[in-house]
């Protein structure tokens, strides 16, 4: 089960509202490669994982991604606090504002709402780990793009932290893949799915 | 120096590799050795990410600022030199 | 920075170190150096949180040690500046 702690993983202290920036950063909340997608991906995949280290890793990274959902939401909250109507109109944030005011709601920068189609839980350990390696790179690229667009040093600070986390997560999923292949028959890794097939190697 | 030894550079490289891979490379619990970066056998049609070995760690203050505890994993975005 | 923010910052630093070690240990469960570092920071963290609870209030609902007031709902929440 989950515990909540009344603190962010990394501080978010934004002094200047900026609706234009909020419009793009929201993709890391409700977009295809965002933190919500990541969290649901890993937390859903973990149940049928055949190896305990991988169950642990998916649980722990999935949980950390929830903390990142919170950080992105805090960034959006602070970027849209005390906006004037003129700022809302000029920035193009009006299309979000009309449906949500300055409430936090998971959509992509395009306005497309969050959907489970953004992630996969395929029930095959090799496949799911590859999905996760790709997901971490997609998130990193999204953060790269946000850094291209954002000048505010307070925003850049928190974004750089989140970006570095994606690289670390990529490394851990890569290690999980090695732990997996070490336990499979190297003559044919694809002979069976240890998450489902009986008589498929399931060494601890 | 006997320059003929470079006539079989592939053989040289293969022997070097085999010597390095003689250390335990298995992650199963019955093997107590450290993990080598890559497994002894790397068949085709699979991805291999090098396994991290313990390296330099930062202080908690540096780690939080940086986004990782491990210096080996720091890869900042430089925007092709466009910024700083 | 006021004492509350300073102590909270310390706790965030310990927690992040522990989280990094947690993920490393998930894939390196027998690494003695990581395990030793984890134990060291676990104790430092425990002490820092206890001090925070006594002086400033709970970080989780279970840590509400004030018998006179449910401090858990008191401002600020982490997304507020």
Image (spheres, rainbow, N blue to C red):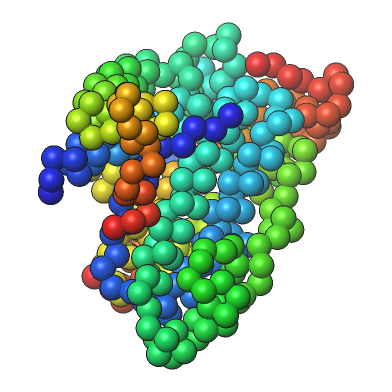
| Image position of B62 with respect to C45: above or below | below
| Image position of C27 with respect to A80: above or below | above
Visible residue check, residue B63: no
Q: Nearer the viewer, residue B9 or A172?
A: A172
Instruction: Look at 53% across and 78% down and name the residue there.
Output: A97
Q: Which residue reaches farthest right?
A: A198
Instruction: Look at 58% across and 53% down and name the residue there.
Output: A36
Q: Quarter holding the C terminus of chain A?
A: top right
Instruction: Look at 58% across and 46% down and name the residue there.
Output: A39
Q: Nearer the viewer, residue A31 or A106?
A: A106
Instruction: Look at 49% across and 81% down and name the residue there.
Output: A93
Lateral position of residue A126 relative to residue A164, left or right:
right
Visible residue check, residue A8: yes
| Image position of A102 with respect to A175: above or below | below
Residue A132 at x, y = what percent? 61, 47
Residue A27 at x, y = what percent? 54, 67
Q: Nearer the viewer, residue A70 or A167?
A: A70
Lateral position of residue B5 relative to residue A201, left or right:
left
């Amino acid at each position: 089960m989950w515990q909540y702690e009344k603190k962010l993983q990394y501080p978010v202290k934004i002094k200047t509202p900026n609706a234009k920036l909020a419009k793009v950063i929201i993709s890391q909340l409700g977009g295809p490669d965002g933190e919500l997608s990541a969290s649901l991906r890993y937390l859903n995949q973990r149940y049928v994982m055949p190896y305990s280290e991988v169950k642990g890793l998916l649980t722990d990274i999935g949980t950390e991604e929830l903390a990142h959902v919170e950080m992105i939401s805090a960034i959006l909250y602070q970027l849209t606090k005390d906006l004037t109507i003129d700022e809302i109109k000029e920035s193009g944030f009006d299309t979000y504002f009309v449906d949500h005011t300055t409430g936090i709601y998971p959509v992509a920068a395009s306005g497309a709402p969050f959907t489970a189609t953004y992630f996969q839980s395929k029930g095959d350990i090799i496949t799911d780990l590859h999905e996760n390696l790709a997901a971490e790179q997609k998130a990193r690229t999204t953060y790269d793009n946000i850094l291209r667009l954002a000048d505010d040093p307070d925003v850049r600070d928190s974004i750089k932290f989140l970006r570095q986390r994606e690289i670390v997560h990529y490394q851990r999923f890569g290690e999980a893949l090695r732990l997996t292949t070490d336990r499979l028959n190297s003559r044919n890794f694809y002979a069976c799915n240890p998450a489902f097939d009986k008589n498929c190697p399931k060494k601890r | 120096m006997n320059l003929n030894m470079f006539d079989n550079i592939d053989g040289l490289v293969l022997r070097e590799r085999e010597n390095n891979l003689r250390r335990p490379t298995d992650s199963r619990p019955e093997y107590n050795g450290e993990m080598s970066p890559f497994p002894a056998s790397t068949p085709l049609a699979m991805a291999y990410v090098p396994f991290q070995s313990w390296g330099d760690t930062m202080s908690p203050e540096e780690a939080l600022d940086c986004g990782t505890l491990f210096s080996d994993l720091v890869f900042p975005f430089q925007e092709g030199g466009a910024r700083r | 920075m006021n004492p509350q923010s300073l102590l909270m910052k310390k706790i965030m630093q310990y927690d992040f170190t522990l989280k990094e070690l947690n993920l490393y240990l998930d894939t390196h469960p027998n690494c003695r150096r990581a395990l030793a570092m984890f134990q060291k920071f676990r104790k430092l963290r425990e002490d820092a949180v206890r001090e925070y609870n006594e002086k400033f209030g709970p970080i989780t609902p279970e840590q509400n040690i004030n018998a006179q007031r449910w401090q858990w709902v008191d401002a600020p929440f982490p997304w507020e500046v």
